[in-house]
């Protein structure tokens, strides 16, 4: 795991906590938790994550890259952003 992946995970975690989990302070989110399955985000939340990744890291995501494999967990997002850098 690269330093970039760890940084991406930390920044995305903060984004999720501030924007989606602020009403659930006791919610524990692990790096491998499935964001949709755990109810952290819905489809609109995925769009917000995509906008965040573009704003924060300059990552443009093609339609065929919008998948559970790339965006489903914090670990997946970290690896995806690192692969685009």
Image (spheres, helix red, strand yellow):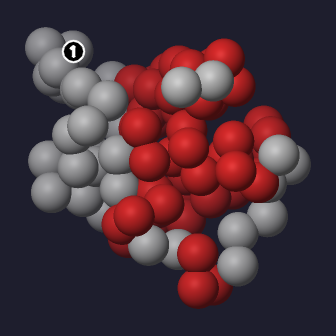
Determine which residue is flagged by label 1. 25
Give residue 21's quadrant in the image: top left
Identify which residue, 61 or 80, lies in the foreground: 80
Looking at the rendering, which quadrant does residue 78 occupy? top right
62 or 56, which lies in front? Answer: 62
Residue 27's place in the image compared with 58, above or below, is above
Horizontally, residue 13 falls left or right of residue 42, namely: right
Which residue is the extreme one toward the bottom? 64
Q: Can residue 1 be seen at all in this image of the molecule? A: yes
Work out whether residue 41 can be spotted: no
Q: Locate residue 85 relative to residue 35 in the image: left or right.
A: right
Residue drawn at point x = 76 percent, y = 54 percent: 84
Q: Quadrant of the N terminus?
A: top right
The structure residue drawn at horizontal position 63% and vertical position 84%, both measured from the top left corner, is: 63
User: Is residue 78 positioned above or below 5 on the image?
Assistant: below
Tally of numbered tags? 1
**Residue that appears at 78% across and 37% down:** 56
Position of residue 76 measured from the top left corner of the image (x, y, whole percent):
44, 48
Residue 62 in the image: state x and y as whole percent.
Answer: 70, 79
Residue extending farthest front: 1
Residue 52's place in the image compared with 1, above or below, is: below
Residue 31: x percent and y percent? Answer: 32, 30
Q: Nearer the viewer, residue 38 or 4?
A: 4
Look at the picture and state if 65 lies above or below 38. below
- Secondary structure beneath label 1: loop
* Quadrant of the image occupied by residue 69: bottom left
Q: Is residue 33 left or right of residue 65?
A: left
Residue 36 position within the rendered picture, expressed as x and y whole percent measured from the top left: 24, 58
User: Which residue is located at x 13 percent, y 14 percent?
Assistant: 26
Lateral position of residue 25 relative to residue 22, left or right? left
| Label 1: few (<14), some (14–19) or many (≥20) C-alpha neighbours in 10 Å | few
């Amino acid at each position: 795991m690269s330093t970039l992946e760890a940084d991406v995970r930390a920044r995305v975690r903060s984004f999720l906590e501030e924007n989606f989990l602020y009403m659930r302070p006791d919610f524990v989110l692990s790096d491998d938790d499935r964001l949709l399955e755990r109810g952290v985000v819905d489809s609109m939340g995925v769009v917000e994550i995509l906008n965040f990744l573009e704003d924060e890291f300059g990552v443009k995501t093609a339609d065929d890259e919008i998948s559970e494999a790339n965006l489903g967990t914090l670990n997946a997002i970290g690896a995806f952003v690192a692969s685009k850098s």
